[in-house]
Amino acid sequence: MGVLELERSAGEPVWSRLPSIWLLGALLALLVLVAAGPFIYPLRPQQASRYALTRAIAEEGTVVLDKYTNLLGSDKAFKDGHFYSDKAPGQPVFAVPFLKLARAVGVEPAHEARQMYSLDLWWVTFWSATVFGAGLLVMMHQRVKREVADLWMVAPLALFFGSMLLPFSGILFGHVMAAFFLYAAFNVLTTRTSSRYLLLSGALAGASVCVEYTAAIGVLLLAVLATRRFGPRVVWWLAGGTLLAIPLGWYQHIAFGSPLRFSYQFTAFEGVVDRAQPLFHIFGEPSLENLAELFIGGRGLIVATPVLLCAVAGGLAQIRRRDADAWVGVAMFFAFLMIPIFWENPWGGASPGPRYMTPAIPFLVVPLAWAWKRWPILTRGAAAVSVLTMTSALVVQAMPYSGAPAGLPVWLRLLGMGLTSPTWFTVVFGWPMGWTIHGAIVVVVLVALAVLSSPRPMRMPEIQ
């Protein structure tokens, strides 16, 4: 042969001939599933409010939670003598078919608040949080691969495992699901131009609000982007959002008497109310104490997740280019930062960090890649601290309330005492063996990712 050919050896395994991008995506998703998926959390107030609504819809065909008061804690709404969930309905509604599937195979429901080892609650959590965390990491990887020539593996892993995306992928909150829909809307909006994709992007943005009301802040920013990018054609994007606004308004009308009344207006967190509260009554005046705690407290942004601030700096350094990832990422961070600044406490209750900022985090993945290239030593150090902190928070079930001791020293001390969260591995195999098996599986997936993502030399055939 007089022409060089690049060919694979006939002896290579079958998996090596699969499209590497699909295999990498599958391994990234698997990493989240095996890292965060096995953890078992008790039925605390936040989870109970969501879980009870899912059960009410699946078992009774109603959104009234009077029959499930044994499950409810402080996170509930009250109107006209009846109890309701004080959460947006998107995640509980999404979980209904999965709960019915669990019932079909004989899984017993949780019976009381703070119940541990509920397979029922874990199953709902897995599909409502862990699966969406896995999909979010894959999307972040694809975005960096598209926008930055290198660092397409390290930046998504550092941001996901070094932020609240990790612990909230293992517990029944709505933040990770909302982040998934919001970031998916952004990706579609910036990579597709046809009207049907504009409609899809708007619907995804609307879905994020159905899951977390506070995601409306991010939707407003995406509306600005859609208007700048498409001009009058933004009506398609708005129409997509309207498709999801209709069922949300219908739920609010059934539960609270008007499509424009939200569950937060009837919250019974501090006792039942006799009429709707002002929409923004949950916000107060900003305090310097909250602001200081938000940044330099034990679970503050500088101390616990400094990788986020490196990403913001990376976005600010690139913002002159008017790159969408730069200005949208920075704008999302500062817009969602307003929530913990004006909230009653900066954490939004029990949380390893300012949890209401979680939907903004994926938008910082490309800016983090830029920061990694510009300030490699600083960013690597920040990522190491962040990953250690958030991994520790996940392992010791660190959902402390506002005034509780929190932060890496506290969580490492708990780890040293062996006070770790139960997982299905520890339930089945016991404490030391369960953690050994769990850790080994995570390491195997990480090694597979490292091998597959490393550049492999191409073998040249002999010239004949």
Image: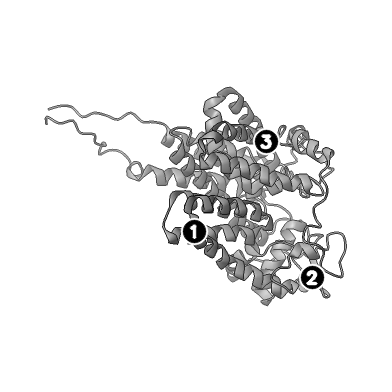
As displayed, is residue 2 above or below residue 354? above
- Residue 376: mark in rendering: none
Q: Residue 173: x, y in percent? A: 68, 54
Is residue 189 toward the left or the right of residue 242 in the image? Answer: left
Q: Residue 65: x, y in percent? A: 75, 71
- Residue 232: mark in rendering: 1
As displayed, is residue 16 above or below residue 73? above
Is residue 363 toward the left or the right of residue 146 in the image? Answer: right
Question: Can you say which quadrant of the picture contains the N terminus?
Answer: top left
Is residue 4 or residue 181 the one in the foreground?
Answer: 181
Mark 1: few/some/many CA within 10 Å (<14, 14-19, 20+): few
Q: Residue 463: x, y in percent? A: 15, 27
Is residue 346 toward the left or the right of residue 143 in the image? Answer: right
| Numbered disc 1: secondary structure | helix
Indicate which disc, 2 or 1, sits on the residue closer to the N terminus: 2
Is residue 17 or residue 306 the one in the foreground?
Answer: 306
Q: Is residue 175 visible?
A: yes
Q: CA distance from mark 1 to mark 3?
A: 40 Å
- Residue 305: mark in rendering: 3
Amino acid at circle 3: Thr
Say if mark 2 contacts mark 1, CB within 8 Å: no
Query: Disc 2 designates what residue?
Result: 83
| Numbered disc 3: secondary structure | loop
Indicate which disc, 1 or 3, sits on the residue closer to the N terminus: 1
